[in-house]
Amino acid sequence: MNKYTPTFQGEVKDNKITVTKAKRMWRDWIAKLSGKKIEIRVKEWKDSRSERQNNLMWAWLAILEQETGQPKDDIHDYFKAKFLTRTIVLKGKEYKVVGSTASLKSDGFTEYLGQFRAESATFLKVDLPDPYDWY
Protein backbone atom coordinates (compact mmCIF):
# COMPACT_ATOMS: atom_id res chain seq x y z
CA MET A 1 0.00 0.00 0.00
CA ASN A 2 1.30 3.51 -0.77
CA LYS A 3 1.96 6.17 1.85
CA TYR A 4 -0.93 8.37 0.75
CA THR A 5 -3.82 8.29 3.20
CA PRO A 6 -6.96 10.02 1.93
CA THR A 7 -9.18 12.13 4.14
CA PHE A 8 -12.93 11.69 3.97
CA GLN A 9 -15.80 13.90 5.07
CA GLY A 10 -18.80 12.54 6.86
CA GLU A 11 -21.26 13.16 9.62
CA VAL A 12 -22.36 11.49 12.81
CA LYS A 13 -26.06 10.71 13.31
CA ASP A 14 -27.50 8.42 15.94
CA ASN A 15 -23.96 7.39 16.98
CA LYS A 16 -23.18 6.18 13.43
CA ILE A 17 -20.62 7.61 11.00
CA THR A 18 -21.74 8.15 7.42
CA VAL A 19 -19.31 9.20 4.68
CA THR A 20 -20.87 12.13 2.79
CA LYS A 21 -18.27 12.94 0.12
CA ALA A 22 -16.23 10.66 -2.15
CA LYS A 23 -18.27 7.60 -1.17
CA ARG A 24 -16.89 5.41 -3.98
CA MET A 25 -13.32 6.33 -3.06
CA TRP A 26 -14.16 5.49 0.58
CA ARG A 27 -15.50 2.05 -0.38
CA ASP A 28 -12.44 1.34 -2.56
CA TRP A 29 -10.07 2.44 0.20
CA ILE A 30 -11.79 0.31 2.83
CA ALA A 31 -11.77 -2.70 0.48
CA LYS A 32 -7.97 -2.42 0.19
CA LEU A 33 -7.70 -2.60 3.97
CA SER A 34 -9.79 -5.73 4.36
CA GLY A 35 -8.24 -8.11 6.91
CA LYS A 36 -5.71 -5.52 8.17
CA LYS A 37 -5.51 -3.74 11.50
CA ILE A 38 -6.33 -0.05 11.13
CA GLU A 39 -6.07 3.19 13.09
CA ILE A 40 -9.16 5.39 13.25
CA ARG A 41 -9.01 9.17 13.83
CA VAL A 42 -12.10 11.33 13.94
CA LYS A 43 -12.16 15.11 14.30
CA GLU A 44 -14.76 17.77 13.81
CA TRP A 45 -14.85 19.25 10.29
CA LYS A 46 -13.64 22.85 10.02
CA ASP A 47 -14.94 24.94 7.13
CA SER A 48 -11.75 26.57 5.92
CA ARG A 49 -11.14 28.52 2.77
CA SER A 50 -11.27 26.50 -0.40
CA GLU A 51 -8.38 25.74 -2.70
CA ARG A 52 -10.18 27.71 -5.42
CA GLN A 53 -10.40 30.78 -3.20
CA ASN A 54 -6.72 30.52 -2.36
CA ASN A 55 -5.76 30.05 -6.02
CA LEU A 56 -7.85 33.07 -6.98
CA MET A 57 -6.15 35.25 -4.37
CA TRP A 58 -2.68 34.26 -5.61
CA ALA A 59 -3.68 34.74 -9.26
CA TRP A 60 -4.91 38.24 -8.39
CA LEU A 61 -1.66 38.91 -6.50
CA ALA A 62 0.34 37.86 -9.58
CA ILE A 63 -1.71 40.30 -11.71
CA LEU A 64 -1.12 43.09 -9.18
CA GLU A 65 2.60 42.33 -9.10
CA GLN A 66 2.75 42.63 -12.88
CA GLU A 67 0.64 45.81 -12.96
CA THR A 68 2.29 47.65 -10.05
CA GLY A 69 5.85 46.31 -10.07
CA GLN A 70 5.54 45.51 -6.34
CA PRO A 71 6.35 41.96 -5.17
CA LYS A 72 3.18 39.94 -4.66
CA ASP A 73 4.20 39.04 -1.09
CA ASP A 74 4.38 42.75 -0.24
CA ILE A 75 0.94 43.32 -1.74
CA HIS A 76 -0.35 40.32 0.20
CA ASP A 77 1.05 41.81 3.42
CA TYR A 78 -0.58 45.16 2.59
CA PHE A 79 -4.03 43.59 2.20
CA LYS A 80 -3.67 41.56 5.37
CA ALA A 81 -2.63 44.68 7.30
CA LYS A 82 -5.50 46.66 5.79
CA PHE A 83 -8.28 44.11 6.35
CA LEU A 84 -7.11 41.58 8.94
CA THR A 85 -5.61 43.81 11.64
CA ARG A 86 -7.18 43.57 15.07
CA THR A 87 -6.39 44.87 18.53
CA ILE A 88 -5.46 42.53 21.34
CA VAL A 89 -4.81 43.29 25.00
CA LEU A 90 -1.83 41.62 26.60
CA LYS A 91 -0.96 42.37 30.23
CA GLY A 92 -3.20 45.42 30.11
CA LYS A 93 -1.55 46.93 27.03
CA GLU A 94 -3.15 47.15 23.57
CA TYR A 95 -1.32 45.84 20.51
CA LYS A 96 -2.26 45.78 16.84
CA VAL A 97 -1.72 42.38 15.25
CA VAL A 98 -2.18 41.25 11.67
CA GLY A 99 -4.17 38.07 11.09
CA SER A 100 -3.55 35.38 8.54
CA THR A 101 -5.68 34.53 5.53
CA ALA A 102 -5.04 30.85 6.29
CA SER A 103 -7.17 31.11 9.42
CA LEU A 104 -10.21 32.49 7.57
CA LYS A 105 -13.20 30.24 7.04
CA SER A 106 -14.80 30.07 3.59
CA ASP A 107 -17.33 32.88 4.20
CA GLY A 108 -14.75 35.15 5.81
CA PHE A 109 -12.36 34.54 2.93
CA THR A 110 -15.10 35.43 0.43
CA GLU A 111 -15.59 38.72 2.27
CA TYR A 112 -11.82 39.30 2.32
CA LEU A 113 -11.60 38.71 -1.45
CA GLY A 114 -14.37 41.25 -2.02
CA GLN A 115 -12.47 43.85 0.01
CA PHE A 116 -9.26 42.87 -1.80
CA ARG A 117 -10.85 43.37 -5.22
CA ALA A 118 -12.47 46.69 -4.28
CA GLU A 119 -9.21 48.05 -2.83
CA SER A 120 -7.35 46.94 -5.97
CA ALA A 121 -9.74 48.95 -8.12
CA THR A 122 -9.89 52.08 -5.96
CA PHE A 123 -6.40 52.38 -4.46
CA LEU A 124 -4.19 50.47 -6.91
CA LYS A 125 -6.33 51.36 -9.96
CA VAL A 126 -6.26 47.75 -11.21
CA ASP A 127 -9.51 46.01 -12.15
CA LEU A 128 -9.14 42.34 -11.30
CA PRO A 129 -11.03 39.71 -13.29
CA ASP A 130 -14.36 38.54 -11.93
CA PRO A 131 -13.88 35.08 -10.37
CA TYR A 132 -17.07 33.82 -12.04
CA ASP A 133 -15.48 34.46 -15.42
CA TRP A 134 -12.78 31.92 -14.50
CA TYR A 135 -15.06 29.25 -13.08
Image (spheres, rainbow, N blue to C red):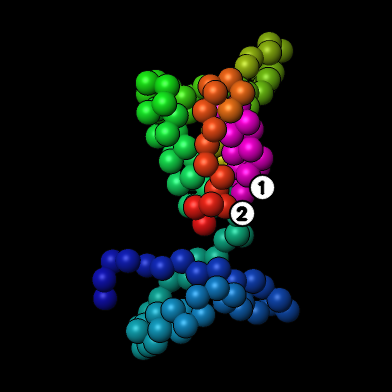
Distance from the alpha carbon under mark 2 to that under mark 1: 9 Å
**First to last magenta residue range:** 105-120
Position of residue 68 relative to residue 41, above or below, is: above
Residue ranking furthest to the top: 93
Position of residue 123 relative to residue 99, above or below, is: above
Question: Can I make out residue 99 in this image?
Answer: no
Q: Residue at x 50, y 75 (%)?
A: 22
Q: In the image, is residue 4 part of the stretch drawn in magenta?
A: no
Nearest the eye: 71 or 81? 71
Left or right: 51 with respect to 90? left
Q: Position of residue 21 (x, y in %)?
A: 55, 73
Position of residue 10 relative to residue 78, above or below, is: below
Q: Residue at x 68, y 13 (%)?
A: 94
Of badges 2 and 1, nearer the viewer stands 1
Left or right: 117 with respect to 69? right
Mark 2 neighbour class, 10 Å CA radius: few under 14, some 14 to 19, many 20 or more: few
Nearest the eye: 109 or 42? 109
Residues marked 2 and 1 touching at CB (< 8 Å): yes
Nearest the eye: 69 or 43? 69
Identify the residue position indicated by label 1 in the image.
107
Left or right: 81 with respect to 75? right
Q: Which labelled disc corresponds to residue 9?
A: none
Q: Residue at x 42, y 34 (%)?
A: 63
Identify the residue position indicated by label 2 in the image.
47
Kindly identify the amino acid type of the residue bearing the numbered disc 1: Asp
Residue ranking furthest to the left: 2
Secondary structure type for disc 1 = helix
Q: Position of residue 116 (x, y in %)?
A: 58, 32
Mark 1 neighbour class, 10 Å CA radius: few under 14, some 14 to 19, many 20 or more: few
Name the magenta segment's main secondary structure.
Answer: helix
Q: Position of residue 43 (x, y in %)?
A: 57, 61
Rendered-image quadrant of the N terminus: bottom left
